[in-house]
Structure formats: structure tokens, C-alpha cells
Image (cartoon, rainbow, N blue to C red):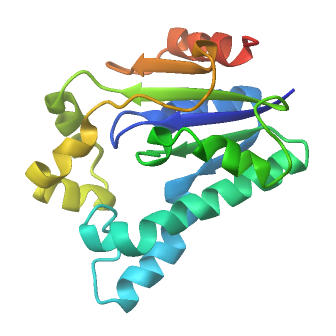
Amino acid sequence: MLKLIFFIGPAGAGKTTLAKAYASKRGGAFLDMDTLLRPAAVALMSLAGKDPEDRDSPFYKEHCRDLGYRITMNAALENLALGLDAIVIGPFTREINDPLWLNQELSTINASTDDVMVKAVYVYLPSEEAYHSRISGRGSALDVWKLDNWEQFSPSLTRSEIRWPVGPASILYLDNSGPFTSEKLEMLENFIDRVN
């Protein structure tokens, strides 16, 4: 059965690191929303006279956010339609709160959760301090707005529940404290391989 694997969670939680480790070992189309959207976001933000590295301001959210999700999901769905597993990385903050969203997306390729095994790994850290430490430590230009506007940004770090109509065996909430380990990768593989 085809797999649609989501690595979801706030900035700095480590979802991309975990997804890359899984994909490098197990394969599949690797679709990181940050990577796919970046050229378009840089162009749109620059044309608007805004910081091209900004990924969190209200202006960015209004003009670029939904485009990123559309690009990413179009690529994921195309790969599924070709018979390839898809690994999707992004915060998906609004999407996980919409119980209809997942099946609406799959229906565009005449599929459903009956045909595609959906696995969602919600990656998080245990405290705001842990996020601040990790985000400031990675030194990315994409994090400048976050750090400069921490009070405005930090509420987005609150852990959310995934409200998609899938069984509990399809969702893993993973506290990603500490460094990446082979034990974390093995746990991910076991979770993703487990048939619902």
C-alpha cells in the first residue's frame, strides 16, 4: 500500500532532520515545503519590497503561506498517483485542525485513506526555551524574524492535536529533545511500517 508520510510540527522541532534520516534509509519522494516554496517566496517577498528571508510575518502568511502548501501537496499527490510513497514536511498548522482536509486532498487523485496509508509524525520540543535554544543555535537567515519577534512568534510553538479521521496507529507525537539517535530512527521506521 502506498504511504503518505507527514512530518509536522513547529519550527525548530527537528522534523526535517528526522524526515531526511528516514528518507535516506527507506526512500520515497522527499517534499520539504521550505525547499519547494523558497524560490517563489523569495521572488514574491522581494517584489513586495519585503525581507526575502522572512517566513513568519503576517505579510508572508497572507501572501505566501497557502502557496507553499499547495505546491507541496500537488507534488505529493502527483508522486502518489505515480505509485511512489511521499514524505511531506511542514508545520501544517491549519490543515491538521480540519478533519476534512486530508480526504479532500486525496480525492483529487481519486484516492482515500482506504488506498493510501497515512502516517503523521508530529514532532515537538518540551518547552519554549528548548525551541529558542534550537532555533537560535541553527543560525538560519529564515529564523531572524522569529527571534526578533519572539513574543509574537512563540505562540505558534504550542503543541496541537491532529484532527484527521485516521486511527491512533496513524499518528505519532514525538518529543524530539536531545540529539538525533539511531534509536529515534528505528522508532520512526517501526511506526511508519506498522499496518493500521
Decide if residue 99 is on the left or right side of residue 86. Answer: left
Which image quadrant is residue 20 in?
Answer: top right
- Return the residue found at the far left: 151
- Return the residue found at the far right: 82
Decide if residue 29 is on the left or right side of residue 145. Answer: right
Residue 163 picture location, percent across and down: 49, 31
- Above or below residue 115? Residue 175 is above
**Which quarter of the rendering shows the N terminus?**
top right
Residue shown at the point (12%, 59%) measured from the top left: 148
Decide if residue 173 is on the left or right side of residue 60. Answer: right
Residue 147 picture location, percent across and down: 16, 53
- Return the residue found at the far front: 100
The residue lying toward the viewer, choosing from 38 and 104, is 104
The residue lying toward the viewer, choosing from 30 and 157, is 157
Residue shown at the point (70%, 59%) measured from the top left: 74
Residue 170 picture location, percent across and down: 62, 20
Residue 48 picture location, percent across and down: 34, 89
Residue shown at the point (48%, 15%) measured from the top left: 181
**Which quarter of the rendering shows the C terminus?**
top right
For the image, the number of numbered tags is 0
Which image quadrant is residue 116 in?
Answer: top right
Decide if residue 19 is on the left or right side of residue 17. Answer: right
Which image quadrant is residue 135 in?
Answer: top left
